Every structure is written in structure tokens, then in C-alpha cells.
Amino acid sequence: MLNWDVQDVRRYKDKPFEFKETLDLTAELKERSEDVLDATPVEVNGQLFNDHGLVISDVKVKTNLKVPSTRSLLPVELPVDIRINEVYNIDEVAAEDLEDYDVVIPVDDDNPTINVYESIIDNILLSIPSKVLTKKEAESDVMPSGKNWAVISEAEFKKQHEEEHVNPEFAKLKGLFKDDDDDKE
């Protein structure tokens, strides 16, 4: 399942090796991240290009995740539509020939396979943003609160923090020069 032996991929020298599958990755995604509550079937459409000792993958992935809101923990539908491009070094190409690529994945000689399956799971999890809000939370600026507590924004926190750090001695001096200004007029 989206795991190919290097020898099979080598056969496609003149044209790309194409694949298209629909996968149920819900169990794997939930197992690897507590943030995933549910997932729709994952549509995978991709190609592997054999290029002088390298295999270049171009994979499009579409799914919908259900994740908790980072503010209220209410479930939020999160559409995922990503493109994954990776380079696999299947013939131990020299490092100086790999400068054009950011990340090159070496292929183990003991188990010479191209594993796109794990890459898809990794990239779906990496695509979950650190801030997820329900539609209502995104439209309004209302933060959750309870008895003797409230969530505040960073800007509000900085404002409160600045107000709390006013030196009381300087606060007394603040009104000292008001009378002098009135006398000059």
C-alpha cells in the first residue's frame, strides 16, 4: 500500500510511475495525534519520477479532519489539500549532486523501498495549524471565561501588564505639573 520496491520503480525510466488510491487513515492519524478526532477517506494522487539514481515524488493529498478548537475544544472541520514533493536517493548519488534539493531521503540497502504511505501520514499531521477556531470563534473576539477566570488575548495581557508595572511614586508625580501648566495660561 503506497510502498514500492525500488526495482519496480526503476522500470519506469521514460515515463512517470503513476498511482491513485483512496485510503482510510483515521486509525493511524488518531494513534499518532490526540488532535485528530476523525478523518474522511484520504484521496491520494501522485507520480514517481526516476531521475539518474533519484526518485522524485509528487503527491497530492485531500481529506477532511475533525480537530478540536484550540480555544474551546469544540470539534472543527479542517479541510486538508496538500502537495508533497520528496526526493529518494536510490543509488547513493553523491552529496554535491544533491544541492538542488532541500531534503533527500536515503533508501536503505537492506529494505530498498519507496515509502510514500508514511510520508502522507506525516504531512497530514504537519498540516494541522497551531491555532484552530470554530467559525463562531473566528468571527467574534469573545474568549471563554468562567467563575473567577477568563482567557485574554496577548494584546490585552500586554496592556494589563504595562498598567500593573506603573511605579506608584511616579504616578504621584504625574499630577504635580498640571497646576503649573494652568498658571501659565
Image (cartoon, helix red, strand yellow):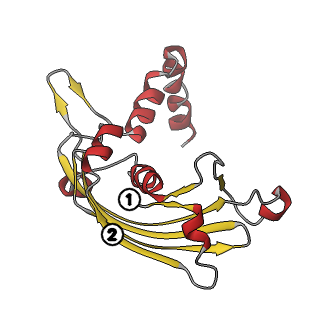
Seen at 45% across and 51% down, the residue is 118
Question: Alpha carbon of mark 2 to alpha carbon of mark 1: how far?
Answer: 9 Å
Seen at 39% across and 55% down, the residue is 124
Secondary structure of residue under mark 1: loop
| Badge 2 vs badge 1, beta-carbon distance below 8 Å | yes
Instruction: Answer with mark 2 or mark 1, whichever residue precedes in sequence.
Output: 1
State the residue in front, 34 or 148.
34
Residue 65 in picture, x, y percent from top left: 26, 55
User: Amino acid under label 1?
Assistant: Met
State the residue in front, 11 or 150.
11
- In the rendered structure, find residue 21 and report the number of the disc placed on it: 2
User: Amino acid under label 2?
Assistant: Glu
Residue 91 in picture, x, y percent from top left: 73, 60
Q: Quadrant of the C terminus?
A: top right
Seen at 21% across and 40% down, the residue is 72
Question: For the residue carrying disc 2, how many other residues have a C-alpha within 10 Å: few (<14), some (14-19), or many (20+)?
Answer: few
Secondary structure of residue under mark 2: strand
- The part of the image, by quadrant, that contains residue 163 is top left
Q: With respect to residue 165, does 97 lie above or below?
A: below
Q: Is residue 33 visible?
A: no
Residue 49 horizontal side relative to residue 34, left or right: right
How many numbered discs sit on the rendered protein? Answer: 2
Seen at 25% across and 50% down, the residue is 26
**Residue at the spot of label 1:** 1
